[in-house]
Amino acid sequence: MAMTRYDCITCKVRNCSILDTCDAETLTAVSTYKLPKTIQKGERLFSEGDPIQGVCFIKKGFLKVELNGKQGRPLILRIAGRGTVFGHRANAKHSNHTCSATAVSDVEYCYIPNDLFNEIACRSQVLKLQIINQVLDELELVEKKAIYLAHKSVREKVAEALLLLADAYKYEEKKQSFRISFCRQDIADLAGTTKEQISKVLKDFEKEGLIKCAAKKFNYLNIEMLRTLAGQSSLAGKE
């Protein structure tokens, strides 16, 4: 699958990445050294324990970011889509990936080797600050995930997982239907429950008018009701 090389200055994905507020000099430097790459559905961008060799900016597609749990069962930490960055946390002490990223659809991304990215970041205070903010956002997400897995009911966990999917796939009630790349087992791994419980709760949600779905296609989600069930405010639920 061929991928066109894009200039960071004109790239629309930049607006939802750590490059958003960078100046033209920084963006030009990244554009000069980055390489366009692709992986297909089912392939891993990297695995837990792999050395971090470069920074990846996701341009198109979705990946599941997961940790290996007990008995080899994974826990999906988050859904990574356009604008997501990987590899930015590497330093002398932290030189290996702490999780895995697997494509759930065909993925296009831009890659820049660590040494070149670090050189660019050293010259840009704005990029440094963006990286720090990104790391803090990721830390907050993991903290919230730990709390929600420990204290929420199965119904609340499934509602939370559906909201994460809706956010990742840019669901809008006026446009209604959207098709996900996640199977029931993936949703279970995202919610921290079982596939059987996911199927049961989704059926219950349909009876209650919270959702309308068939296989991987969701025709309707009552976002406000799901937020209430998940214990979120009307402005919460975004990564």
Image: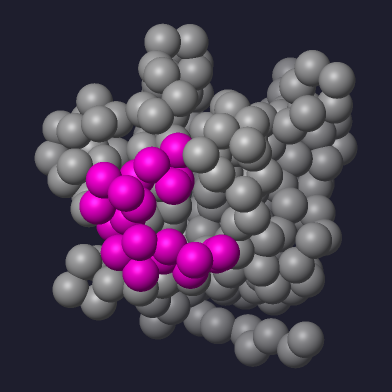
Q: Is residue 203 above or below residue 196?
A: below
**Which residue is painted at 69% across and 72% down in the image?**
106
63 with respect to 232 (left or right): right
Q: How many marks?
A: 0
As rendered, which of 72 and 53 lies closer to the eye? 72
**Which residue is painted at 64% across and 31% down in the image?**
194
160 with respect to 73 (left or right): left
| Image quadrant in which you'd find residue 208 | top left
Percent x, y of residue 129: 38, 37
Percent x, y of residue 33: 67, 69
Q: Quadrant of the C terminus?
A: top left
| Image quadrant in which you'd find residue 22 | bottom left
Percent x, y of residue 203: 44, 47
Percent x, y of residue 209: 24, 52
**Which residue is painted at 59% across and 28% down in the image?**
193
User: Is 206 colored magenta in this rendering?
Assistant: yes
For the magenta stretch, what is the residue range?
201-221
As rendered, which of 162 and 47 lies closer to the eye? 162
**Which residue is painted at 51% across and 39% down in the image?**
200
Q: Residue furthest front?
A: 207
